Image (cartoon, grey):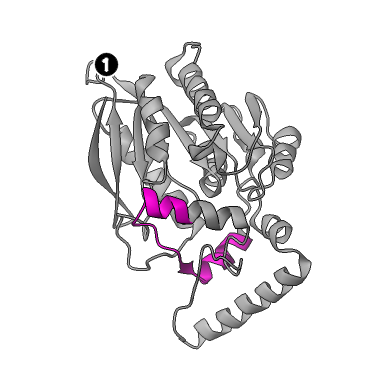
Amino acid sequence: MKRENIAFTSEGVKCKGWLYLPENASEENKVPAIVMAHGFSLVKEAYLDRYAKKFSQAGMAVLVFDYRNFGESEGSKRQHLDPSEQIKDYRNAISWVSRLSQINKEKIGIWGTSYSGGHVLHIAAIDKRVKAVVSQVPTINGWRGALRKMGKEKMEKFIQQLIDYRESRYDNKKQQYIKVVAVDGQAAQPHPDCYNWFLQTHNSIAPNWENRITLESMEKYLEYDPAGLIDLISPTPLLMIAAMDDKITPPDMAIEAFDKRAREPKKIVKLPGGHFDVYNGETFTEASDAAVQWFTTHLIGKEIKV
């Protein structure tokens, strides 16, 4: 397995990432590829290499990238988080990796987690180049998720703040930002678990992560319904991974979407623990092994024990 730094163009913006290639990948021996990116405001350094290594060791190429405006990628509107743009970056990443001589373009998988766990649900529904999808602790609906985290009173005040900001943008007022996490919870991600994990991750392995996003990003979040087309993912195989003590992306919302609207072939894995345990906590091994098994079965075409 080897990793190299790469860049691809997405609508004129250069997105940077890592390409993992198994040792046996060649023009004569084309391998499947997994495309993956991180969740809400995060950069690829925040534990995505742990997943990519396991996928590559199982015989698949992996493209891990930073979205436009984040991390090492270019973009003039820094720290602006627009799911529609991030989805375009995913789809352009698929186009780029599919053109490599070592890649079997008929065997492309996508993996996402948290916010990007929602992205991949939408992408798999509309982009039929995708032949397998893993959606981990996913965002299901931005508005309902925010209401769950904030409560009715705080949500109403926040919506008024966004209305006031939209009015100011019409008058060409200055760009405003909001913290991703804060010790007092006055942030885009208000739960205390977020503050502790994001800051620990920033200090230890992801120093290029920034604790701010544009306030406009929160408008985009509330408007976002990534599971709205979940029934259209079929016949692409869908694996959903839920953390049953998740306070960030409520597991009951994911399970309901999976049970009531997703169609076969599908599988759900319900893990103990919280939202961040799947990255560097006790459930990383279970979550990553389940994803390896899913991609190996549906892209390589063999059952494995992990």
Magenta residues, start to end:
199-222
**Is residue 240 something one can see in this rendering?**
yes
Q: How many marks?
A: 1
Would you place residue 160 above or below residue 68 in this image?
Answer: below
Q: Amino acid at mark 1?
A: Asn
Residue bearing mark 1: 29
At horizontal 38% and vertical 49% (from top left) the residue drawn is 204
Question: Label 1 crowding class (10 Å Cα cut-off): few <14, some 14-19, many 20+?
Answer: few
Q: Secondary structure at mark 1?
A: loop
At horizontal 55% and vertical 33% (from top left) the residue drawn is 282
Would you place residue 265 above or below residue 272 in this image?
Answer: above
Q: Is residue 29 left or right of residue 195?
A: left
**Is residue 125 something one can see in this rendering?**
no
Q: Is residue 123 left or right of residue 91?
A: right
Q: Quadrant of the N terminus?
A: top left
Q: Position of residue 23 (x, y in %)?
A: 24, 20
Q: Position of residue 127 (x, y in %)?
A: 49, 39
Q: Is residue 12 left or right of residue 257?
A: left
14 in magenta: no
At horizontal 74% and vertical 33% (from top left) the residue drawn is 259
